[in-house]
Amino acid sequence: MTSASPDIFSLPISTAAPPAMFHRQNHAVTPQGCSIGAPIQTNNFSNNLTLDDQLCPVWTQPYSLWYAQDPDLDVGLAFNHTTAQQRVFGPDSAANPVQFYFNPPRIKSFVLSGEGFQGNVALRLENHHKMSVMVKIVLGNDENKSLLAPLVQGMGFITAIYNNIVPVVVSPVGVASFTEQVAPPGLTKYRVQLFNQVVWSMYVVGSVSFALRDPNHIVASGIAQGVTVQFCSGESQYYDQTAGCYPVECHTSATLTHNDRCVYSFNYLLQGRSVSQASLVWAFPHHVEAATEETTRAKVALTLDSTTKGPMSAFITSQLSMEEALPVSIGMEPWSAIPGFTGATYSEQALAKIRAAAEKDVAQDVVTMANIDSMYTSGKILDRFAYILYVCHYVLKDSSLTSQLLPKLKQAAEIFSTNHQQFPLAYDETWKGLVSSAEPGADFGNANYNDHHFHYGYHIHAFALIGTVDRDLGGAWTSCVNDYITTMLRDVANPSEADVHFPVSRSFDFFHGHSFAHGIFALGDGKDEESSSEDYHFAYGMKLWAQLVGDANMEARANLMLSILRRSMNMHMLFSDDNTVQPANFIKNKCAGITFENKVDFSTYFGRGSIENEWIHGIHMLPTTPVSSYVRGPTFVKEEWDQILGRIIDRIDDGWRGILMLNYACCNPRAAYAFFAGDSFEQRWLDNGQSLTWCLTYCAGVGGA
């Protein structure tokens, strides 16, 4: 394996055109307001502005913004900030825990508008990047008459640059008072108090002044040429120190500081000037907790509430840097965070049980079972048998069982690696991505970019296990399937804009600290994700594949994603009793359910469970692998079991029982092993992605027997 680069994001996985086995096609959904050519993000914060009528909000955090286009009102870019006190809890607001909470959407504190905007403008999107995009509102199809608004994750101000337009700021809430304040050199500052008593600060760089024309309109004194208008919630000396400067782009970089530590940074490209010669940016709690010493020194005493991830802290800087310890020691073998665990071991009795299960599992027809019409389900089945193969070769060390399963599993896998499955994958030249050829509503919306990290993560992980066994037996199978897996990795986790065939990091949002699963569907509450475990399963599969092919940069990125996920998810999706980030009346749910940008709903898209919410808990567990205990620590797993799952487990009579019990091994492997090894165990208690072979192996290996 080669050494990692100074910046592990600097080199693309590949820049070659996607392999010819993937048919080229154009997508039925066309990005709105965009020039087709460069890759366009499908699962990130700005995607709503590219869909349908472009009217759904986006969240840069802590602010929300949206295109206001009501013909009876002023048109432009609306924005708002909501506080924790404004959250709506339901359906029974007095319950503890409540089922959901959300932030009131589309409260138009202000609309950045201009004279003549009504019915005479178009919103365009330019300079697309993962963490930023430039909004351009053009007046009368005249490119010289525009409002530019850079949208950047964590930006401290809402910023608009006016060119050849008379700026108008509309407040449908209504302005109670508008007063000019003492301002730093080069700035004009206004204090704006709305009728809802909320105070905003407004800063202007340029030759025009503003006055309150009526309670709903703040109007400039004339045509603006290169005039910058900025808004922020509240008043602070730190706003005065940073106003006039603003980010227009943000890019992620990361450097290994040791073999097992990594510093990752958000690098803000700034324009304008400020007293501090820097801008103000906002960071989530999981950023603050991991911040480097240098970044911590840039933190100031100013906070604003985010929508779903607690209070955000302000930093005066052009770079946020965080340091994480990497899970370099976690490999293919069972692993546990339980104190005292030193490595997987197996008693002779456990090995006999595992062997008996493996003999039955190996005899199954994996080719027929895997050759189905779903990338997601086929991936789970391939992964299930890949783990059986791992056990046969590395745990049982049984060459007979390995030689029986390996050819069958290769045959099943090659149906997909040659793209001959029932619905082959295609390369979409519109958005730039690898999608199913099934109709958009099939396979959980894969064709519309839903869940790619879930679907492809199972395939990547399965192929990594198969390839590792084959390599250790002297084979070269990995080279035969490399194009297939590499293209999947580029689709989901391309690290570099040098690869023009895929967007950067389609699924994983380094700012939020987790992936978003929802693709090109406009959603009023923004992007979402409901399976934290399948998120880190993708990163884990990526890590194992990188180890197999010797890609040090990819392995480091995967380890970094896992370490960020561990920190972020234990604040925002998995709730120990001592969680202080989520609302106190929500954490007793123990897991988030579905996390949107603007709400959290203790539910799933497919139901709640036939007994008592077991589907909601289970979708945050599957599949249980060596990395599960790294994210779902034993304290949290025990709390969830003692408070909720332990009292319902005996009433669950389907595959969700196996999911919950295998997860229980993360805190009580003996009890979990006894369940799977018991004489009363029933096969119907296994999910279609589980095998008894792996369940016994994992539980025994981490201390169950």
Image (tube, helix red, strand yellow):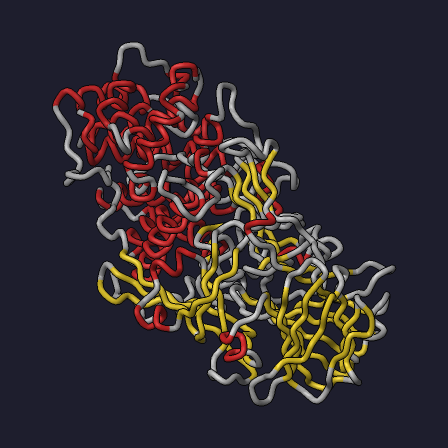
Q: Position of residue 576 (x, y in %)?
A: 36, 39
Residue 584 appears in view? yes
Q: Which residue occupies the foreground of this view, 51 or 481?
A: 51
* Figure label count: 0
Q: Position of residue 132 (x, y in %)?
A: 56, 67
* Vertical side of 197 occupied by 205: above or below: below
Q: Name the residue located 34 percent from the left edge and 50 percent from the top edge.
A: 545
Q: Position of residue 337 (x, y in %)?
A: 24, 40
Q: Is residue 580 above or below residue 275?
A: above
Determine the image quadrant of residue 684. Answer: top left
- Quarter location, residue 331: top left
Report the front residue among 247 and 491. 247
Closer to the camera in the image, 350 or 225: 225
Task: Give the side of residue 219 with respect to residue 13, left or right.
Answer: right
Image quadrant in which you'd find residue 222:
bottom right
Of residues 176 and 88, which is closer to you in this image?
A: 176
On-image quarter of the N terminus: bottom left
Residue at the far left in the pictured view: 348
Residue 483 visible somewhere in the drawing: no
Would you say 475 lies left or right of 385 here? left
- x, y percent for residue 80: 65, 60
* Left or right: 263 as drawn, with respect to 167: left
Q: Quadrant of the C terminus?
A: top left
Residue closest to the far top: 680
Q: Is residue 164 above or below residue 268?
A: below
